[in-house]
Image: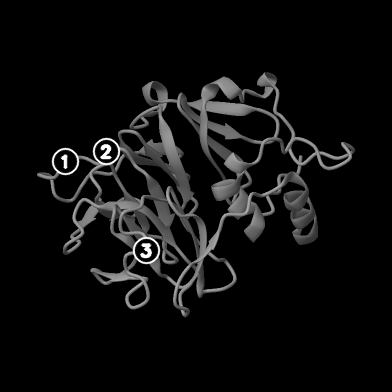
């Protein structure tokens, strides 16, 4: 069975920001075609498992993070992976990311681990500073173009690691314990949302605000929930937050454009059909 996940800009926006606003995306207008197919329990994928995240690796496998462990789906069946049998840091999976060497990094409620494709095993990296507490709840993971993995944890720390190496904690002057969401873009920029401080780009140990002149208080009392750099336009980043909703921010312009449009089923269907 051919496994293809066409990832286009609008689909990503819908998944990250819009699905909660849509009441029914099961069928296309007219009921003749379907956007989504439900996987029966026979495949090993059950709605009762509490699916939290999903990614497809460069070998075609689909990895599914749940509240009860990790699943690897090959198009026909799933392989269940849990803490007791495979050494995950927890069965509560929060996020997934593949690095440039094909390793799958797994964020959990109790730290991070990765699947080593070459060794066909799961490994748990340790902090380089043994006095620091082990990574806690991992909120997000992102891979730099050179293969380094960056992530943040429940202590609000910004951390990085490479397969086979220890975890490095990065000191953030004035921003300690505030990192919440991170995301690399195609230009090697690491976007970091800081709790009640706004959105920043992390550059050589310095946190540079995205709104330095125009409106530095725009997100100052808000909670950013997701950050998505545009895959084709380096000046645009999509931001969602509890108070402002969905914003499209053009870095070279003065302020974010706030989009409170409720994505209708018909609009999403037509747009995806055009971009597929």
Name the front one of labels 3 and 2: 3
Residue position for label 2: 136
Looking at marks 3 and 2 on the same chain, the residue that comes earlier in the sequence is marked by 2
User: How would you rate the neighbour count of disc 2 (Cα within 10 Å): few for under 14, some for 14-19, many for 20 or more?
Assistant: some
Residue position for label 3: 218
Is residue 194 shown left or right of residue 240?
left
User: How would you rate the neighbour count of disc 1 (Cα within 10 Å): few for under 14, some for 14-19, many for 20 or more?
Assistant: few
The reply to whether callout 2 and callout 1 are in contact (CB within 8 Å) is yes
Image position, residue 98 (x, y; %): 48, 51
**C-alpha gap between disc 3 and disc 2:** 29 Å
Q: Which mark is residue 133?
A: 1
Which of the colour schemes (rainbow, by chain, secondary structure, one colour) is used?
A: one colour
Q: Residue at x 57, y 54 (%)?
A: 260
User: How would you rate the neighbour count of disc 3 (Cα within 10 Å): few for under 14, some for 14-19, many for 20 or more?
Assistant: some
Quadrant in which the N terminus is drawn: top right
Residue 8 in view, yes or no = no
Instruction: Return the residue nearer the eye: 149 or 260.
Output: 260
Name the front one of labels 1 and 3: 3
**C-alpha gap between disc 2 and disc 1:** 8 Å
Image position, residue 218 (x, y; %): 37, 63
Q: Residue at x 62, y 23 (%)?
A: 44
Instruction: Return the residue nearer the eye: 19 or 1.
Output: 19
């Amino acid at each position: 069975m051919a496994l293809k996940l066409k990832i286009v800009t609008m689909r990503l926006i819908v998944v990250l920001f819009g699905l909660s606003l849509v009441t029914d995306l099961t069928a296309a207008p007219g009921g003749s075609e379907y956007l989504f197919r439900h996987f029966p329990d026979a495949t090993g994928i059950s709605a009762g498992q509490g699916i939290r995240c999903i990614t497809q690796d460069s070998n075609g496998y689909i990895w599914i993070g749940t509240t009860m462990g990790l699943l690897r789906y090959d198009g026909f069946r799933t392989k269940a992976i849990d803490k007791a049998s495979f050494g995950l840091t927890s069965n509560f999976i929060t996020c997934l990311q593949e690095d440039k060497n094909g390793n799958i990094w797994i964020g959990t409620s109790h730290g991070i681990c990765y699947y080593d494709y070459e060794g066909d095993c799961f490994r748990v990296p340790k902090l380089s500073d043994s006095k620091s507490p082990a990574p806690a709840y991992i909120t997000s993971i992102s891979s730099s173009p050179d293969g380094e993995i960056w992530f943040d944890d429940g202590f609000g720390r910004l951390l990085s690691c490479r397969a086979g190496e220890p975890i490095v904690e990065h000191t953030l002057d004035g921003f300690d314990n505030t990192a919440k969401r991170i995301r690399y873009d195609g230009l090697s920029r690491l976007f970091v949302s800081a709790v009640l401080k706004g959105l920043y780009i992390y550059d050589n140990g310095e946190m540079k605000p995205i709104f330095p002149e125009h409106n530095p208080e725009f997100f100052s009392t808000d909670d950013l929930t997701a950050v998505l750099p545009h895959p084709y336009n380096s000046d645009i980043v999509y931001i969602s937050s509890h108070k402002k909703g969905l914003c499209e921010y053009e870095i070279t312009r003065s302020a974010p454009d706030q989009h409170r449009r409720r994505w209708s089923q018909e609009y999403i269907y037509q747009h995806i059909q055009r971009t597929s």
